[in-house]
Amino acid sequence: METRIKPTAKGTSEPIKGKPGSFRIYFSLGRDPESGKNGKRVRYLKTPKRTIHCKSKNPRNWPGEVANALDAYRKELETYEPAGDMPTTVSGYAEDFHRLRESSFGSPLSFQREEYDVRHIRELFGDMPLGALRPDEIKRAYAEAISTGRFTEAEIRRIHVKLKQVMQDALENELIGRNPCISVKLPKPDLRVRNFLPPDELPRFTKCLLSEPMGPMTVCTMLIFHLGLRKGEALGLCWEDYDPEAMEIRIVHQYTNDKTLRAPKSEMSRRILSIDSSLAAYLNDWKMRQRNLFEQRGLRQRNSDPIVHALSPHKDENGNLHVSITRPDGHNYSRWFRDFCVDNGYGEYANVTSQFERNGKLHTRGTGYSGLIPHGLRHTAATALVANNVDLKTVQARMGHASASTTANFYTHAIRANDRNAAEVFEKLSEGNEN
């Protein structure tokens, strides 16, 4: 948001209170030439502050990480080409805030998602001056957007989180006197309402899945269903992550929608999961079938090959057709899953475009889907664990949640049911009836 900094500009880091390993960094730009005139107070300029989180848990390594972050920020500011004067509107400032943060994102998808949030901020608040944004203006804009159906409550919550960050940045850069988002309280989402299968539906879902021809899509679904994986984690698995002897699967990658193999969502998402005997038998069978499938196409199965694969045909420079092993597109998997759910009574299409019969079963295709989604199977797995008295710490570890509070908030309904059962158990014991 400022002009290019001088080579001599001093970098500063400030530890964030209550957050060990987190710092705000910025550079001093010297005295404001417009200040100090006519008896006014002398003002010193600085670049926008940037928050960094050190990866190391050892405090001795933090100074080095902070120094590297300052160097990267310096290089970015030295080459920054400002679009003009300091933006004074909410949308203009949000766009500059977003642009300056590009190098701090580990994933281009995260940067792209923030870009959508910034577009929505522009749509809601347009060219309103930064200093004119008041809590009542924010509330009014949100209420109108929800009443007209432009945004859902969940989307408004996401937009508000980003707007709050933007306005906090403006506050720290002394462009506004207070952050108007602080006093805007949005209703918390009802985390008890989750899209998942009830326990008595699990056998039928398993039967439906096993009745499908075994292939990459059914294998992906079985992994998510049994282990509560995220879709990207299941797509990111390769055979070297599976230990059939120990009956364990190692989660060290995720395959994102931009078709890139990345590290998991968080450090807690890196985990080793024990698997049940039925899933182990299923995977062993699939590995043999996959090997035969590859050999039919002149390919050799390797430990580095994905468990959930796709075959990609391509031509070489001489026009000869070849096939390579890759991973399925996440969108294609979700499309297959929607069709599977509609065919088996776990979802429906609002607009039916075609119907056909295969092996005595009616198949429906269409648009406007509502029903179970892949992530719902993750909630199904976690809910089943909690409902069967598996402790929260273990559920947290298997799900890869960053904290146990996340697990507790997500699956409150199952925890409350357990609490009711606990009360009834004590009643029976106190009456001398242990049966």
Image (tube, rainbow, N blue to C red):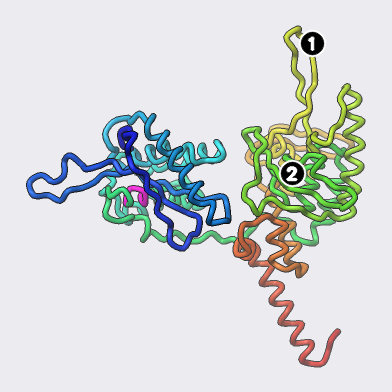
Q: Is residue 84 magenta?
A: no
Marks 1/2: CA–CA distance = 33 Å
Q: Where residue 72 sits: x, y (%)?
A: 46, 38
Query: Which amino acid is tagged 2?
Result: Ala
Q: How many marks?
A: 2
Residue 417 in picture, x, y percent from top left: 70, 72
Q: Is residue 305 above or below residue 147?
A: above
Dot 1: what SS? Answer: loop
Amino acid carrying label 1: it is Asn
| Whole-percent x, y for residue 306 in the image | 78, 36
Nearest the eye: 236 or 131: 236
> Going 18% across and 39% down the picture, which residue do you hit?
33
Vertical order, 362 against 405 (above or below)? above
Residue 328 screen position, x and y as percent: 73, 33
Q: Considering depth in this image, is 228 or 17 the residue closer to the camera?
A: 17
Picture residue at 65% right of the left edge, 37% below the top: 367
Q: Please give the label number shown on residue 320.
A: 1
Q: Nearer the viewer, residue 391 or 3?
A: 3
Residue corresponding to mark 2: 234
Can residue 259 be seen here? The reply is: yes
Which residue range is magenta in the image? 167-171
Quadrant (top left, top right, bottom left, bottom right) of the C terminus? bottom right
* Res. 152 visible in picture: no
